[in-house]
Image: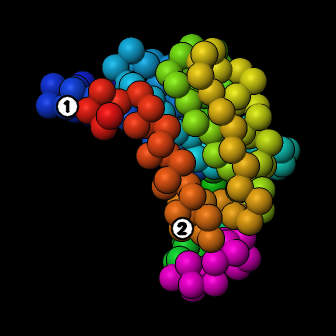
Amino acid sequence: GEGLLQLREKCSEVFVAGLSMGGALTLLLCARHGDKIRAAASLSAAAVFKDWRIGLAGPLSHFIKFFPASDSCDLTDVAANETMKSYDRIPLRCVSELKLLTGDVQKELPAVVTPLLIMHGLKDKTLWPGNADYICSRVSSADKEVVYLKSSGHGITVDVEKDFVADRGFAHFAKYSMVMR
């Protein structure tokens, strides 16, 4: 919230967008400081995990520090797939912390009243695409919209529909801007 307050001192309008864990943080920021945000976009956001094994990350992290990252990539864009570099291993403690973060998101979604654009790739293998409908059904925003991207994986900002994501996000923000009109 401190960064948001600093932005508000310098900017007449603040818009927030986040991808994946950043999408979860966007939702929390809107829940806690929505009166300072004109509009927000939640992109491939983490709110719910369908895989029950995620719940084991916390207890297992005391014994197993890392697990190997998957070699598979869900991006349709071959060029983006080749330029994306991921970690060779994933710390279990980080997975456990993300699970705790999503618990906070679930509890605080009803407090979100900020105009919200929710986008998610249907080919996402990292986070269940149903997160988009889950989020939409629980936020209290009067203006909320879910957009599914049929050809994109988790990284919708770099995949084949990235231009649509950018254009649709800009249009959403412009709708609520006094400056961009």
Q: Amino acid at mark 1?
A: Cys
In the figure, is residue 67 to the left or right of 37? right
| Whole-percent x, y for residue 8 in the image | 22, 26
**Magenta residue span:** 69-83
| Whole-percent x, y for residue 32 in the image | 45, 18
Say which residue appears at 41% left-offset and 28% top-offset: 176
> Residue 164 or 96: which is nearer the viewer?
164
Q: Residues within 10 Å of mark 1 (few under 14, many from 20)?
A: few
Q: Amino acid at mark 2?
A: Val
Corner quadrant of residue 138: top right
Q: Which residue is mark 1?
A: 11
Residue 125: in sight, yes or no?
no
Residue lying at the far left in this picture: please name it. 10
Q: Sequence-wise, which precedes: disc 2 or disc 1?
A: 1
In the figure, is residue 180 to the left or right of 69? left
> Residue 82 or 149: which is nearer the viewer?
149
Say which residue appears at 21% left-offset and 26% top-offset: 12
Q: For residue 158, which numbered disc appears in the image?
A: 2
Helix, strand or loop at label 2? It is loop
Is 139 located above or below residue 100 in the figure? above
Q: Identify the main secondary structure in magenta.
A: loop
| Whole-percent x, y for residue 96 in the image | 64, 44
